[in-house]
Amino acid sequence: MAQKNPNFLLKRAVFFYLTNFMHVFCCFFCKNTYLRSVFMTKLIFIY
């Protein structure tokens, strides 16, 4: 950890970015499905 290894830092940055991206994607997907279900129920109620 003391030595400055660019490869290790790059792997860590990529790992952090991927986990962050997956978290944001999962949150957006869950919210999107929730909004879609609400939208579909509203369409069903309208028609």
Image (cartoon, rainbow, N blue to C red):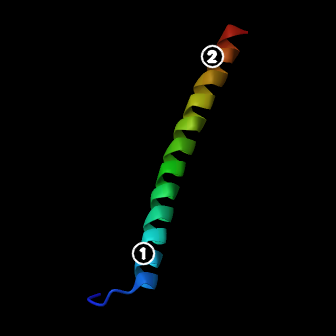
The residue that mark 2 highlights is 42
Residue toward you, 3 or 36? 3
- Closer to the chain start, of discs 1 and 2, is 1
Q: Secondary structure at mark 2?
A: helix
Farthest residue toward the right?
47
Q: Percent x, y for residue 45?
A: 65, 12
Q: Assign the C terminus to one quadrant of the image.
A: top right
Q: Residue at x 45, y 58 (%)?
A: 20
Q: Is residue 38 left or right of residue 9?
A: right
Which disc, if any, is residue 24? none
Tally of marks = 2
Q: Give percent across and percent down for residue 29.
A: 57, 44
The type of residue carrying mark 2 is Lys
Q: Quadrant of residue 30?
A: top right
- Tell me if residue 3 comes above or below residue 22 in the rendering: below
In the picture, the quarter occupied by the N terminus is bottom left
Specify few, some or many for label 1: CA neighbours under 10 Å numbering under 14, 14-19, or 20 or more.
few
Picture residue at 47% right of the left edge, 54% below the top:
23
Q: Is residue 5 above or below residue 38?
A: below
Q: Amino acid at mark 1?
A: Arg
Q: Position of residue 38 (x, y in %)?
A: 58, 25
Residue tagged 1? 12
Query: Circle 1 — which element?
Result: helix
Rendering coords of residue 37 (x, y %): 61, 29
